[in-house]
Amino acid sequence: MEGQLVTHSEKHSEQKSNEIKVVFGDINKNNVEQMRQLNNLCLPIRYQDGFYTRIILKLRYGKFGK
């Protein structure tokens, strides 16, 4: 699924400016800290280090949206 483009357009409008393009990419050792920071800022819970390790090792499913 690396680099797969997923789009969503508002159904009640046909203007291109309302289209949102999202690309999902793998979470890896180079960007896992970004995920940790996003989770800390957006979620009311804190995940332990093992949670992020399992994502890097592909033992848990995880993708980033760009």
Image: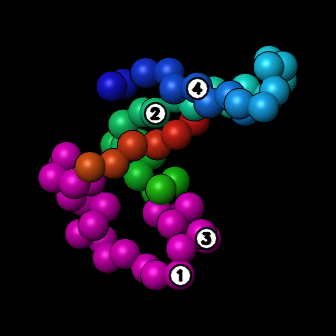
Residue at the image position 81 percent from the left and 27 percent from the top: 13
- Label 3 crowd (10 A; few <14 / some 14-19 / many >=20): few
Is disc 2 placed on a helix, strand or loop? strand
| Closer mark to the observer between disc 4 and disc 1 | 4
| 51 left or right of 65 in image | left
Give the labeled residue for mark 3. 41
| Closer mark to the observer between disc 2 and disc 4 | 4
Disc 2 and disc 1: Cα gap in Å? 24 Å
Q: Which residues are magenta?
A: 36-60
Disc 4 and disc 1: Cα gap in Å? 29 Å
Is disc 4 placed on a helix, strand or loop? strand
- Where's the N terminus, which quadrant? top left
| 10 left or right of 59 in image | right
* Residue 52 belongs to magenta span: yes
Residue at the image position 46 percent from the left and 43 percent from the top: 64
Residue at the image position 41 percent from the left and 52 percent from the top: 32
Disc 3 and disc 4: Cα gap in Å? 26 Å
Give the labeled residue for mark 2. 24
Q: Amino acid at mark 2?
A: Phe
* Residue 44 belongs to magenta span: yes
Give the labeled residue for mark 1. 44
Disc 2 and disc 4: Cα gap in Å? 11 Å
- Which mark, residue 14? none
Give the labeled residue for mark 4. 7
Q: Amino acid at mark 3?
A: Leu
Q: Are marks 3 and 2 in contact (CB under 8 Å)?
A: no
Q: Please name whichever residue, 16 or 12, is drawn nearer the observer in this view of the structure.
A: 12
Disc 3 and disc 2: Cα gap in Å? 20 Å
Which one is earlier in the sequence, the residue at label 3 or at label 2?
A: 2
Q: Please name whichever residue, 44 or 27, is drawn nearer the observer in this view of the structure.
A: 44
